[in-house]
Image (cartoon, rainbow, N blue to C red):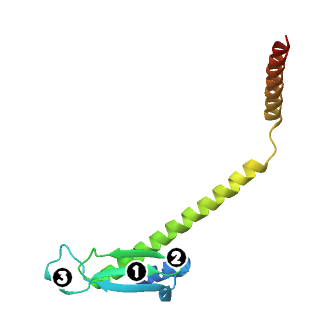
Amino acid sequence: MPTTDIKTSPEEQLAQRMSSLGVMERDLEETFVCSGGKGGQNVNKTATCVMLLHRPSGIRVKLQDARHQGANRYAARVLLLDKIETARRVRAAEERATREKARRQSRKPSRAAKQRMLADKSHRAMKKGARRVGAMD
């Protein structure tokens, strides 16, 4: 008996992606405005432009690509999820870089680095000592 893969609709995929990112529909503030540009009378008369605001993160998206409000609503949510994902990835990378920098700063210098540092110190001490001898004459 062959298994049939049930194809999920784009709306279901969007809902799954929203839940995996922890974005709730109640966290979104959605407003519609008249869009401009191509589309003729349709865009001038109907509010097809979608503006979404994700309240917890403060990320705002405005989209007016399609002539239909439903298509713009879907595309705006996809764009919003992309931005939220990118923001989280950037934040995680910054935290990782901060931890790595702190780790590098707190580790002890290597034996070779310590020897170089001591050699430089003694070299500076000899230069200063030579100056002192010359000043006393």
Question: What residue appears at the point 26 percent right and 85 percent down from the top-left corner?
Answer: 47
User: Does 33 sit above or below residue 98?
Assistant: below
- Separation (CA) of disc 3 from disc 2: 31 Å
State which quadrant residue 79 falls in. bottom left
- Separation (CA) of disc 1 from disc 2: 12 Å
Q: What element carries label 1?
A: strand
* Among numbered discs 3 and 2, the one appearing first in the sequence: 3
- Residue 74 image point, x, y percent: 36, 80
- At label 2, the amino acid type is Ser
Question: What residue appears at the point 53 percent right and 82 percent down from the top-left corner?
Answer: 19
Residue 95 as seen in the image, left or right of residue 121: left
Question: What residue appears at the point 82 percent right and 44 percent down from the top-left corner?
Answer: 108
User: Does 80 sit above or below residue 127?
Assistant: below
Q: Do the residues labelled 3 and 2 touch (CB within 8 Å)?
A: no
| Residue that carries the numbered disc 2 in the rendered image | 57
Query: Would you call the spot at circle 3 few (<14 residues within 10 Å), some (14-19), or many (20 or more)?
Result: some
* Among numbered discs 3 and 1, the one appearing first in the sequence: 3
Q: How many labels does the image show?
A: 3
Query: Which is more toward the observer, 8 or 39?
Result: 39
Q: Is mark 2 on a helix, strand or loop?
A: loop
User: Does 112 sit above or below residue 71?
Assistant: above
| Residue that carries the numbered disc 1 in the rendered image | 52
| Res. 11 mark | none
State which quadrant residue 115 falls in. top right
- Residue 75 image point, x, y percent: 36, 76
**In which quadrant will I find the C terminus?**
top right
Q: Can residue 6 be seen in this view?
A: no
Residue 104 as seen in the image, left or right of residue 87: right
Q: What element carries label 3?
A: helix
Query: Which is more toward the observer, 128 or 50?
Result: 128
| Residue that carries the numbered disc 3 in the rendered image | 44
- Residue 117 image point, x, y percent: 80, 31
